[in-house]
Image (cartoon, rainbow, N blue to C red):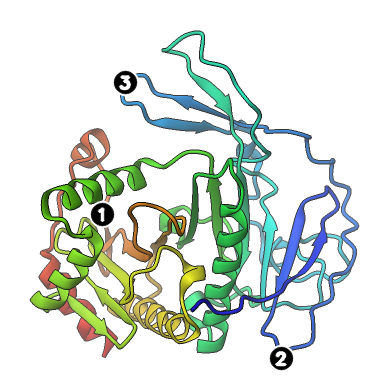
Amino acid sequence: MNRPLPDPTVGHLADGREILLFDVSEAPRPVLETDHRALAPRPDGPTTTVRRDPQTGDLVIVAPARQDRTYKPPKQMCPLCPDPEGLSSELPVHDYRVAVFENRFPSLFGVAEAAGPPENALRVESPGVGRCEVVCFSSDHDGAFAGLTQEHARLVVDVWAHRTAALLSRDDVAEVYCFENRGEEIGVTLPHPHGQIYAFPFTTPRTAALMREAQAHRASTGQDLFESILAAEVADGDRILIRTDHTTAFVPFAAKWPSEVHVYPNRHVRNLSELTAAEADDLARVYLAVLRGFDALYGTPLPYIASWHQYRTDAAEGYLHAELFSIRRSADKLKYLAGAESGRDAFITDKSPEAIAAELRKALE
């Protein structure tokens, strides 16, 4: 049932970090040149820590070295543009289609070692093991995911699937999270089109909440929560944006954000690597259409976060889907997470989900 995934060209950067170059199978294999930068070798083990908040049980990653990460460099010094001389970029290549490399300033890094019980229940801390990767969607500095061709977008989907399968094979990885931050308003400091992948050593609060609801729904109804959500949205129809043989995109019933879309494959799978070729093609097509609709909404590039929910194949609960949302609530206004949202996680929305869907359907036309 699963499709074949691309076989990357694999190499290493000057400090030992891994880099992978991906292209479609018919294309010549990309050539990785030598990285000549004078970078300090990577540490042998984790450089960050994970602390438990004793009030809530939340886990917080403490990563002070990220204060030194690259911040809004001029275009000629962009670290994500090709540099065949290997002097100034993370990509010592003449050109590339999709590239993945270990983040130079990771929140999580290294492998797990056995640890004993904490000595103080109020001071629980562990090494920040895991892996953080950067995914460059294109070598075009001025491009965007929404501007990719269908074939190129499908390649990115396959790259996400490749990395998801590889990272989930680690016993110390609890969750693999593929995401994209787009726009300065979101906090992006490198405008070159790219996303990231975090391999977490713990289950994130968002995923834990979804799993709790899924387990409660199954216990009370005998049904899968995500299948029920998709079926209910299709039955309602009011918030459906796109419905194909393989994929459905809709505004959720309780949307929190001024623009929010969830994208589900119609067949229940746990992660991107489980899709067939036809399903992956269609998912890429629908995903592109949603992003292009976002940009058409106000006639200007929309700042957004694209967030993929994935699970291990043998997970008791879980359904692959993407959640895309923006903080822009009108052409000239942003939604700020102020007192209720930031202080209590109690979202207040200024638009009904049905109105959001109507606006996006018009933009998709």
Image quadrant occupied by the C terminus = bottom left
Q: In the rendering, at what x and y percent does residue 249 appear?
A: 28, 76
First along the sequence among labels 3 and 1: 3
SS category of the residue bearing label 2: loop
User: What amino acid type is highlighted by mark number 1?
Assistant: Lys
Q: Where 35 sits versus 276, above or below?
A: above
Q: Nearer the viewer, mark 3 or mark 2?
A: 2
Question: Cβ–Cβ below 8 Å for labels 3 and 2?
Answer: no
Most foreground residue, 361 or 335:
361
SS category of the residue bearing label 1: loop
Residue density around tag 1, few if under 14, some if 14–19, many if 20 or more, within 10 Å: some
For residue 65, side relative to residue 196 (left or right): right
Residue 335 - label: 1
Distance, label 3 to label 1, CA atoms, is 28 Å
First along the sequence among labels 2 and 1: 2
Q: Which residue is mark 2?
A: 26
Q: Quadrant of residue 136?
A: bottom right
Most foreground residue, 43 or 283:
283
For residue 328, side relative to residue 130 (left or right): left
Q: Residue at x 34, y 65 (%)?
A: 324
Residue 72 visible within the image: no
Q: In the rendering, at what x and y percent does residue 340 appear?
A: 18, 38
Q: Nearer the viewer, mark 3 or mark 1?
A: 3
Q: In the rendering, at what x and y percent does residue 158 appear?
A: 56, 74
User: What amino acid type is highlighted by mark number 3?
Assistant: Gln
User: What amino acid type is highlighted by mark number 2?
Assistant: Glu
Q: Nearer the viewer, mark 2 or mark 1?
A: 2
Q: Quadrant of residue 287?
A: bottom left
Q: Which residue is mark 3?
A: 55
Question: Cβ–Cβ below 8 Å for labels 3 and 1?
Answer: no
Residue density around tag 2, few if under 14, some if 14–19, many if 20 or more, within 10 Å: few
